[in-house]
Image (cartoon, rainbow, N blue to C red):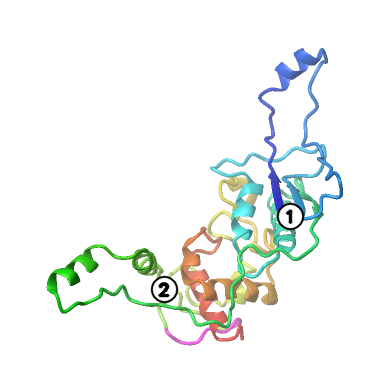
Amino acid sequence: IRLIFLDACRDNPLAEVLAKTAGVKGARSGLAEIPIENGGAGTLVAFATSPNQVAFDGSGQHSPFASALLAHMGETNVSITEAMNRVTADVFKVTAGKQRPWSNVSLTTEVVLHKIDLNAPLIVGEATTQKSEAGSDGRNVAANPSGADDAQLSLDMLRQKIPRLASDEPIFFDHPVDFGDPEIDGKSIAELIKGKPRFSPVEGLDKSVWEGKHCDGCHEWNEARLCEQSKNFAANDVSVLRLQHPLGTRFKVALAKWAQGGCK
């Protein structure tokens, strides 16, 4: 399997030099299409925008295309083609239709980058130390934990950073939720996804693009799709800390709990 992702800056820093070298007035802007030769079986080439079009740089660390990739490439049990569909939809909306990612696909099988069994129980263990009848041996084992113990310790530390909801009551899609955040407390998931985002839907996106607008204008949110996303949070609890959500981290925690209850 070969996956190629090509982003394109809005302004080509080499345009003037290339134009002089080629003896033309100006270098053509835009991202050129790269064909897949010799059948290209098992290949996906993803472009930040359509052929001969330019892509937005964004004002932060990542462009809208890169931010959307980061948001969707790690989603659980989502094929690479579906992930790219979601990337395209997000970028198209946050750029008000000015940028549409495009893919050249020649995959012969379904490719899922993060595949897990959602029915498998989530292992939430406490870091343990082995005890030995010989005190010195026991101390040495505790002082030099195995790689598995190190990973569990790191996981436990991350879990301590997950914010707790204000209530342990079951969460329903259209019922008010006590998030523990005064800005969204008392509102339902159904209500919030039609409201206005609190944070940028894509990292680095200029405020003029998203501030004051409604969430359904930048995300293809509906109950079924949100349920699938929420299952990812439920299956991997620390994933709620991965990227800032337009409605905040507590909203993602609530989504995970909603999914655990069957997305009712």
Magenta stretch bounds: 168-174
Residue 166, percent from left and from top? 40, 78
- Residue, disc 1: 88
Residue 42, percent from left and from top? 77, 55
Left or right: residue 138 versus residue 160 is left
Disc 1 residue type? Thr
Q: Main secondary structure of the magenta part?
A: loop
- Closer to us: 46 or 132: 132
Q: Residue at x 37, y 69 (%)?
A: 152
Which of pointers 2 and 1 lies earlier in the amino acid sequence? 1
Q: Residues within 10 Å of mark 1 (few under 14, many from 20)?
A: many
- Residue, disc 2: 180
- Element at badge 1? helix
Q: Nearer the viewer, mark 2 or mark 1?
A: 1
Residue 114: image quadrant is bottom right
Could you tell me how far apart the alpha carbons at marks 2 and 1 are, in whole angstroms? Answer: 33 Å
Residue 173, percent from left and from top? 60, 81
Classify 172 as above or below 97.
Answer: below
Disc 2 residue type? Gly
Left or right: residue 215 versus residue 36 is left
The image shows a total of numbered marks equal to 2
